[in-house]
Image (cartoon, rainbow, N blue to C red):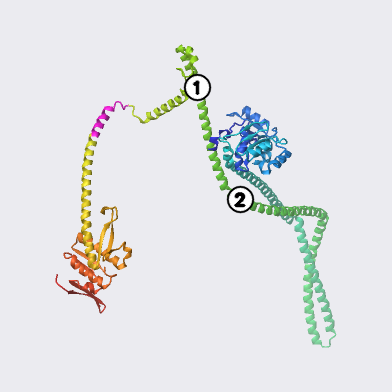
Amino acid sequence: MIFANFPQLTFEYMDPVKNFDRRKVRGPACLQLELKDPKDAVALEVTAGGKLYNIIVDDELTGKLLLDRGQLKRRCTFIPLNKIIGRPIDNKIVQDAQALVGPRNALTALSRVDFTKDLTPAMEYVFGGTFVCPDMEYAKKVAFANNIQKRCVTLEGEVFDPSGTLSGGSTGNKGKLLASLAPVTRLKKEIMEKQNELTKLQKEIHNFRQVKDRYDTLNEQYELKENELQLLKSRIEQSNYHKQMEEFQKLQQALEEQYARLSACKEKQKSAEKLIKKLESTSSKSARENKVKEAEKAVANCKKKAVASLEKYNSVQGEVNGLKLEIEGIIEGLPTYEEQIEASSKLIAEWEKQLQEFEVERKEIKESVSLITEQVKTQKAVMKSHSSEISKITKEKESMMKQISHAELQMQQLEHDIKNCGDKAGDAQQKLKHLLEKHKWIEGQKKYFGVPNSEFDFQNFDLRGLSERLKELEQTKEKLHKCVNMRAQNMLSSVEEQFENLMKKKEVVLQDKKVIEDFIRELDERKRVSLREACEQVNKDFGSIFRTLLPGTNAKLVPQPGQTVLDGLEFKVAFGDVWKESLNELSGGQRSLVALSLILALLLFNPAPIYILDEVDAALDLSHTQNIGKMLRMHFKKSQFIIVSLKDGMFNNANVLFKTHFNDGMSSVTRTALRQK
């Protein structure tokens, strides 16, 4: 609706060049600001005037491109931010004005709006050089002060110009634009904030993705280097040098074991020789012989072991000699192997160093990725929380776009109407020319056109009103053409015949109506007569029954003052000759007797063959109970009563008495005939 009421707010254009940056076009000035106080709307709109609809652009080149190639649908004034020069009021003048009338009574128009900093030149151009004052008195003082001499606008829209001109009066629609745009500006600001947040989040996500890609690359390099290190280790283990070193260590260990066994055999040989010498020195021949035999046996065993050891030693020595030769060959090639080992060690050290660096970097990246992941989760939660607001703003934006489309349609309709008016004006010119040619007298009488009290006095001739009336009648005719039968004239005879038949039926119905109304009046009269008779009879029985139930009293039913029986009746009860004003003066038992009397009187008016009363005397004392029995015998001689009661006063008036007993856990009923009917 805002854009429909203010079509100037809609600014549409085609991109003047390919890949044109639409961010350079800010839009109408009124959409780029926000009121600090809604009550300033009229004053600010009067201050800015038509500048509110000027289009703000970043530079003059953008404005030139839009004018040349933007295919604009209306005339537009552009405000280039890089060229426009505003004329804000000097601070010294502001201080003098506020000192003259007070700080709150002389505020610059520029200070009453909020806008982004980059729009300052444009806002100074639109609102600069004007004070906003609360009323005409302050505005007059400020505008015409010798040391101020600045234009002043009141909150009601009156303008005081130091040049001497004053303007004011009805503001019309002034102030409605800025007041109506307040929610639009607020929504636009929120949309911009959300878009900035979205851009920031997109940048962070882009940075996170770059870090993740870097992490993936380094992790892949780390895995490659680790595989290369494992391959080098396996190659070193499978080389001849490594195998020969292992064989050399095994042979050297076996040689040391043989040397140890040889030393042990020599020790045994020495101990055997000592034993032989000792045996030779003993005196016992048999013992000596035994010892000698044992010694010889031991020596033989030792010799066997020595021979075996010597053989093994010789074989081992041969292997050792072969190994020594191999070792000498290896030692000769050892510098080459050492160089290879040293180079491999250096390479391994470098790779291990790089591996450590990669590991440190991997840990850092992993921590960074964890931190970034948490941040991404947080940002996703924030984005999710904002998604509802964004969707709401999007819906409002769509609604505004619909309003803009509606305004565009209206604008096109207006353009079409303008074109039609132009065509009609051309047709009118042609018709005028044709009339002048057809009616030659017009040229001679033309000088009398519009002369008062003449034949051609047009003051009393409202051509526009008649044209509008003609247009309305044509529209009415067009509307009626759709719903009015154009063949009605042809159908007139048949419709008239139907009308005559209907009128005859109407007369019959009116006669029937009269008969029915007469019958209703007769029934109403019968009803009134019957009601009066019924009331008299019921009133008579009501008083008689009540006197029987409560001796010394009387009761009747009477209409209220100024009313009839048909309007209603009220109770009147008398004790002796004193009539009570209302039933509130009676006791509860007396009111019960009044109600019972009325019910029995109504029953007596249209008696039934049998009645059943269930403890109607429960709330009454014994004397009243006896009176009920007497009353029933006196007034209801042609009716039968089945009465449930627990009092003897009622039993005494009964013809037949049924009693219930409870004997031995069982109930029984006995019948007693007190008197014959």
Q: Is residue 410 visible?
A: yes
Of 552 and 92, nearer the camera is 552
The amino acid pointed to by label 2 is Val
Indicate whether 208 appears above or below 602: above
Give residue 598's position: percent from left, percent from top: 25, 62
Which residue is found at the position 52% from the left and 30% from the top? 412
Question: Is 13 contained in the magenta span?
Answer: no
Q: Which residue is mark 2?
A: 382
Label 1 and label 2: CA atoms lie apart by 60 Å
In the picture, residue 508 is in which quadrant? Answer: top left
Q: Secondary structure at mark 2?
A: helix
Q: Secondary structure at mark 1?
A: helix
In the picture, residue 591 is in which quadrant? Answer: bottom left
Question: Is 493 contained in the magenta span?
Answer: yes
- In the image, is 183 to the left or to the right of 269? left
Give residue 639's position: percent from left, percent from top: 18, 64
Q: Main secondary structure of the magenta part?
A: helix
Q: Which residue is mark 1?
A: 423
Q: Give the magenta range.
A: 487-503
Of 276 and 514, nearer the camera is 514
Which residue is found at the position 80% from the left and 86% from the top? 287
**Reading the chain from its start, which is encountered first: label 1 or label 2?**
2
